[in-house]
Amino acid sequence: MPQRRRAEAPAPVFAALGDENRLRLLTRLGNGEPMSISRLTAGSGMTRQGVTKHLRVLAGAGLVRGRRRGKESLWQLERQRLEAARRSLDLISRQWDESLNKLKLFVESDHSD
Amino acid sequence: MPQRRRAEAPAPVFAALGDENRLRLLTRLGNGEPMSISRLTAGSGMTRQGVTKHLRVLAGAGLVRGRRRGKESLWQLERQRLEAARRSLDLISRQWDESLNKLKLFVESDHSD
DNA sequence: GTTATAGGCAACCAAGGGGTTGCGCATCGG
DNA sequence: CCGATGCGCAACCCCTTGGTTGCCTATAAC
């Protein structure tokens, strides 16, 4: 069950992205088709339980969602959270760019005064 | 793609971003002005050593760079790595969008046929 | 039915991470 | 010179995490 959490904090999302295996899972899910756990496990180099754990972490960060269909559980990407993370990065780097520009302008125009 | 040591791997960068305190440090450094450790420590709610550790983690991910000036060490943001992280996220979400679009087109065009 | 497949739960383990304290060293300011 | 300030290093602590194995349940297939 996707519990609703304070979704705005970007740090947990980044933390969830901060693992090679989880990134691989995301890219494998990136083709849009929901995949079962055992299918994700195949060729992943880890145990089914390992994959399950990683999927839960990703789900906890809201990056992924799983549902049960029959005897298998299908997982797919969750769009919004990924874009939210992107916006967070944009925020930082844009803020930083603006400050740099201000600083540059200041230096160039006011330095001789 | 030639896997260049650890520099290009996005996971460590995300891992470095996956901590509230580190994100705060980044945003505080985001005004462009290099800051000393003790200045960063003030109002951060943690010890100087805590700040130092976090700065080292950020530096390890290439997000930040520090140099020594006199008795203090000044730290500032590192632009490129931040944008590299942004590009990584773009990559995932774009790949995903494309797949979704393909799927959508397929569904919409072939559904009635 | 029986068997095979897909997962969940719990325990366990080694390793790393966040955070602290104590101490020592350089540098700045009087 | 002496004291205060700014840091680094190392040790330590506790909690989380990545990953495993073992066992049990539920669904599917025959």
Image (cartoon, coloured by chain):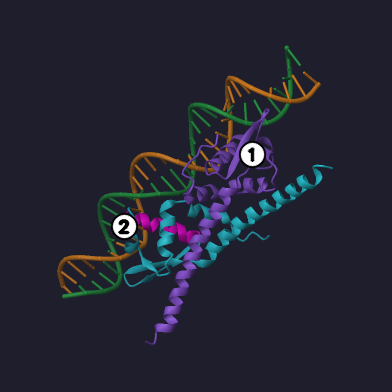
Chain colours: A purple, B cyan, C green, D orange
Residue drawn at x 55%, y 63% is B83
Q: Is residue A106 visible?
A: yes
Label 2 sits on a secondary structure element that is loop
The crowding category of the residue bearing disc 2, from other C-alpha atoms within 10 Å (few below 14, some 14 to 19, many at least 20), is few
Q: Is residue A19 visible?
A: no
Q: How far across and how far down the image is residue C22, in percent?
A: 25, 52
Q: Is residue B62 magenta?
A: no
Q: Amino acid at mark 2?
A: Gly
Q: How far across and how far down the image is residue C5, in percent?
A: 71, 29
Residue drawn at x 79%, y 42% is B111
Q: Amino acid at mark 1?
A: Trp
Q: Which image quadrant: the C terminus of chain B?
A: top right
Residue found at the far right of this picture: B113
> Which chain contains the residue that carries disc 2?
B
Which residues, given as a range, are shown in magenta?
A: B46-61
| Location of mark 2 (residue) | B43
Q: Label for residue A75?
A: 1
Q: Label for residue B76?
A: none
Mark 1 touching mark 2, by CB under 8 A? no
Q: Which image quadrant: the N terminus of chain B?
A: bottom right
Label 1 sits on a secondary structure element that is strand
Q: Are marks 1 and 2 on the same chain?
A: no
Residue drawn at x 55%, y 34% is A1
Left or right of B63: which side holds A22?
A: right
Most foreground residue, B56 or A112: A112
Assign the magenta stretch its main secondary structure.
helix
Q: Is residue B57 magenta?
A: yes
> Which chain contains the residue that carries disc 1?
A
Q: How far across and how far down the image is residue C6, in percent?
A: 68, 31
